[in-house]
Amino acid sequence: MWKRWNQTAHIWERSVDNGTSWTPLPLNAASINEGSFANLSVTSIANNTGLAQGQYNPVTSNPANISGILCRASIYARVGDIVTVGGIVAQFTIPGAGAFAFDLTLPIASNLPTDGTYANGTFVASSVPVTATIYANGAVVKFSGYSGVVGTFFGSYQFIYRVQ
C-alpha cells in the first residue's frame, strides 16, 4: 500500500492508495503512534527566550543643549534578541541652536557596545527642523542631533536594539 502526505489549510492529512484513488484519512491516535507525526504544542514562551511586549517609563540623562525633557510612557515589543521601541517626547526645550544630545533608558536591560552598533533609530520634532539619530551607548541609547531653531517643542522617536 502506497502512502502520500499533503498539507491542506495548515492541517496535515494522511492519504492511502485504496487501489483506485487517494483517500484522505483523519489524524488519529493510531497514526500518531505509527511515528509519522510528532505531537507538538506550545502554550507559552518565557520572556527570557525572546518574546515580550509592554509599556515602560523611560528615564532621560546626560542632557546637552536640551532641557525640560518630558517623555510619555513608551511601548516596546521583543522578538528574539531584537527590541523595537516607540514613544513620544511631550516637551523639550532647545535653548540654543546647534548640536544637542541626551540618553534614554531601555525597556529590557542590555549592555550595548558604545561604538553605536546594535541599535539605531530616529527622533523627529513636530513641524520644526529638529532631528536626531539614535545609537547604542552601553545600558542606554543616545539621542544625538541638531536643531536649527530655539524654543520648546514635542516629538516622537522609534528605535530598535539588540539585547546583549
Image (cartoon, helix red, strand yellow):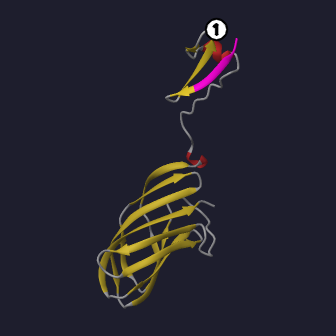
Q: Please identify the residue farthest to the top as the structure is shown.
A: 19
- 157 drawn magenta: no
Q: Secondary structure at mark 1?
A: loop
Considering depth in this image, is 110 or 147 the residue closer to the camera? Answer: 147
**Measured along the vertical axis of the image, is residue 122 above or below residue 35?**
below
Residue 38 image offset from top left, x and y in percent: 65, 25
The residue that disc 1 covers is 19
Residue 105 image offset from top left, x and y in percent: 49, 67
Considering depth in this image, is 154 or 105 the residue closer to the camera? Answer: 154
- Identity, as a three-letter code, of the amino acid under mark 1: Gly
Which secondary structure is most common in the magenta stretch? strand
Q: Residue at x 56, y 57 (%)?
A: 82
Q: Quadrant of the N terminus?
A: top right
Q: Quadrant of the C terminus?
A: bottom right
* Residue range (magenta): 1-6
Residue 150 image offset from top left, x and y in percent: 32, 88
Picture quadrant where residue 153 is located: bottom left
Picture quadrant where residue 46 is located: top right
Q: Residue at x 44, y 84 (%)?
A: 100
Image-based side of 3 in relation to 142, left or right: right
